[in-house]
Image (spheres, rainbow, N blue to C red):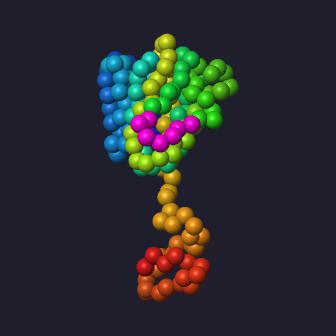
Amino acid sequence: YNFLIGEVVPKTMDKENRVSDVWSDNLFVHIISNNQLYWHDESHGLAVYNEDRLEVNVAGDAMISFTGCAYGDTASIVPAITTGTITSESGQQFSGLGDGKDGQEVVFSYTGDATKIVFTVKASKEAYLHKLTVKNEVKLDNPDDKRIKVWDFSGVEESDASLYYNQI
């Protein structure tokens, strides 16, 4: 979700037309604010404030990354979950990092079942988010099966089943 170009929060939701909440088109992301939410510009992206929330629906194990802006207030993003585990090796600060650090990512790794993860902004003033990326991990039918999946869309012809997992 590229906030710089007005994805999720359209450019029409500017400083003069703030909103309290907005959903992504696919309904996987819900952003909630105290009527302060707005698109700042193509250099900063989404303006967020203390206690704003980004609710992210994941299908199970996932990597969630926030690309921050160096020029907003110093701000962090804090996750809350009701199931599974979530960690971050890159810390939680996404904004106010200073010159040369624009676009740095804060990456969270979630392990567990499908759920909603609530990320809460902690900032004393206005902070900015460039992007939010959610990558759901693919779960294998049988993790011990090292065969290659193959499909045959023309004539139904099975490949060697010891090497290939036929999807016919």
Return the residue found at the far top: 124
Q: Is residue 98 magenta?
A: no
Seen from the viewer's position, the closer of residues 87 and 7 is 87
State the extent of the magenta-drawn residues as a range.
81-87
Return the residue found at the far right: 100
Residue 154 position within the rendered picture, expressed as x and y whole percent measured from the top left? 43, 83
In the drawing, does residue 36 fall left or right of residue 150? left
Residue 75 found in image quarter: top right
Q: Residue at x 62, y 22 (%)?
A: 97
The vertical placement of 47 against 24, above or below, is: above
The quadrant of the picture occupied by the N terminus is: top left
Q: Residue at x 51, y 40 (%)?
A: 85
Residue 117 position within the rendered picture, expressed as x and y whole percent measured from the top left? 43, 37
Any part of residue 115 in sight: yes
Q: Is residue 86 magenta?
A: yes
The vertical placement of 167 against 136, above or below, is: below
Residue 77 position within the rendered picture, expressed as x and y whole percent measured from the top left? 51, 27
Q: Residue at x 35, y 45 (%)?
A: 26
The vertical placement of 25 against 12, above or below, is: below
Any part of residue 134 in sight: no
The vertical placement of 6 against 35, above or below, is: below
Q: How many marks?
A: 0
Residue 100 position within the rendered picture, expressed as x and y whole percent measured from the top left? 68, 25
Seen from the viewer's position, the closer of residues 106 and 61 is 61
The quadrant of the picture occupied by the C terminus is: bottom left
Residue 156 found in image quarter: bottom left
